[in-house]
Amino acid sequence: MRHRRNPMRQFMPMKPNKWGTKFYMTCCAETAYCSRLEIYCGKANADEVSVAQRAVVRNLIEVLRGQPSQRLVCTDNFYTSVPLSQKLLSMGHSHVGTIRKDRKGWCTGVEFTQKKRPKRMPRGTYKIAVWREHQEVAALTWMDNKPVRFLATGCSTQLTQVSRREADGTLAVVPCPQLVRDYHEAMGGVDVHDQLRLQRYSIQRSIRMRKYYKSIFLGLVDIAMVNAFIVHKLAMKKRNKPVPTHAAFMRRLHADLLSQTKEDFSGGDDLEALVTEPLPHLAHTLEKTEEINGAKRRQWLCKVCSAHAGAGTRSYETSFYCATCSRVKKGRLTLCNKVRRLQHGNNITCSQIWHQSWRNGTAIPAELQHKIRFVSKRRPGVESENSDSDV
């Protein structure tokens, strides 16, 4: 993403390409899947470090919205700071990361005077300190070949071991606190994603654009293709089928794209219609009620909208319902077929929330269950004993 007229261009001395556009990415530590990213647009009224830390918090809020707490967040020394650790702890997440010694609030009492490990000092020696006011926050300097500084919240400090490579190439077992091992095991999701995106089959790096924003767009396409490859690998593993290599996946993707014809893109639907149409999920398909209220179809409040309704939140009416879930719940389940909410960083319909996020109504969040009620249909002249039933 190098371009001399790019107003967002940054100098990054530690990167292979010194000049480029900076991304703040949130990636899974196990799969390297990129869940969310922000593009650094330049300094505003704060320094670059605080901007990066706020980007981390925003990404995590969107990615982990509605997810269980107590996730371990790993950051490198560019992002790690005491305020960031405190913020993540208040959100219910543990945090571990390397930190620079000039960060505000860093405990200088755990510093080693040596810049390199002396021969007389055993590898794995460390100094640790715990914050008096917040016992969950720990500062640690662990002596590898050079001192490595860690800041952790909610992590274990029990002694364990980690494998490190010696100068001759052999592996050695080095003692360390558990938080150091957690960092080594969980760190690297962004690096793996960058390797798949930049070192192999990159569209962005193979084409040089005169407009910098076109190059950024191609970079986003590369990210989408890497995510598709990661999801495809997981799907093949789940089906107990051979996992393709990155090259095989790209060949198949290119072949599928080249096989598309004009008829595959002709449907007459505009963008708004495509966005508002729900995606079918197994046998659960929305149907439109046949009941008429005057000249219009009768509408009821959407169950998902009603559950989320509160102060300043609107509840919408709809004439669509899921016949399958209505039979199971013994009451009409009306759901919006339009995109109204944001979950896990994606804009989805109320139907997708009910059928996918809430697993057809079996995994409704506890704080929302009491807000959802079903009213069974009554035949004229017949009084139902169980007309109302709570989920």
Image (cartoon, rainbow, N blue to C red):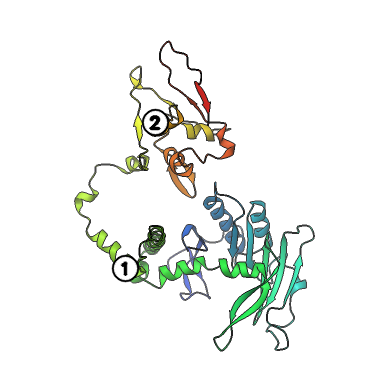
Neighbours of disc 2 within 10 Å: few (<14), some (14-19), many (20+): many
Describe the element under mark 2 as helix, strand or loop.
strand
Q: What residue is shown with label 1?
A: 248
- Location of the N terminus by quadrant is bottom left
Neighbours of disc 1 within 10 Å: few (<14), some (14-19), many (20+): few
In this image, 192 relative to 119: left or right?
A: left
- Residue at image x 56%, y 36%? 368
Q: In the figure, residue 324 lies in which quadrant?
A: top left
* Residue 15 at x, y percent in the picture: 50, 74
Q: How many numbered circles are shown?
A: 2
CA gap, disc 1 and disc 2: 42 Å
- Residue at image x 33%, y 65%? 249
Q: Is residue 13 above or below residue 182?
A: below
Residue 178 vs residue 6, the one in the foreground:
178
Residue 44 vs residue 168, the one in the foreground:
168
Q: Can residue 254 be seen in this view?
A: yes
- The disc at residue 52 is none
Q: What residue type is labelled 2?
A: Tyr
Q: Residue furthest right?
A: 132
* Residue 217 at x, y percent in the picture: 38, 60
Q: In this view, does 240 lie above or below 347?
A: below
Q: Which amino acid does label 1 sit on?
A: Ala
Q: Is residue 99 visible?
A: no
In this image, 5 relative to 296: left or right?
A: right
Of callouts 1 and 2, which one flags the residue occurring earlier in the amino acid sequence? 1
* Residue 213 at x, y percent in the picture: 39, 61
- Residue at image x 64%, y 82%? 145
* Residue 210 at x, y percent in the picture: 35, 67
Describe the element under mark 1 as helix, strand or loop.
helix
- Residue at image x 57%, y 68%? 185
Q: What residue is shown with label 2?
A: 321
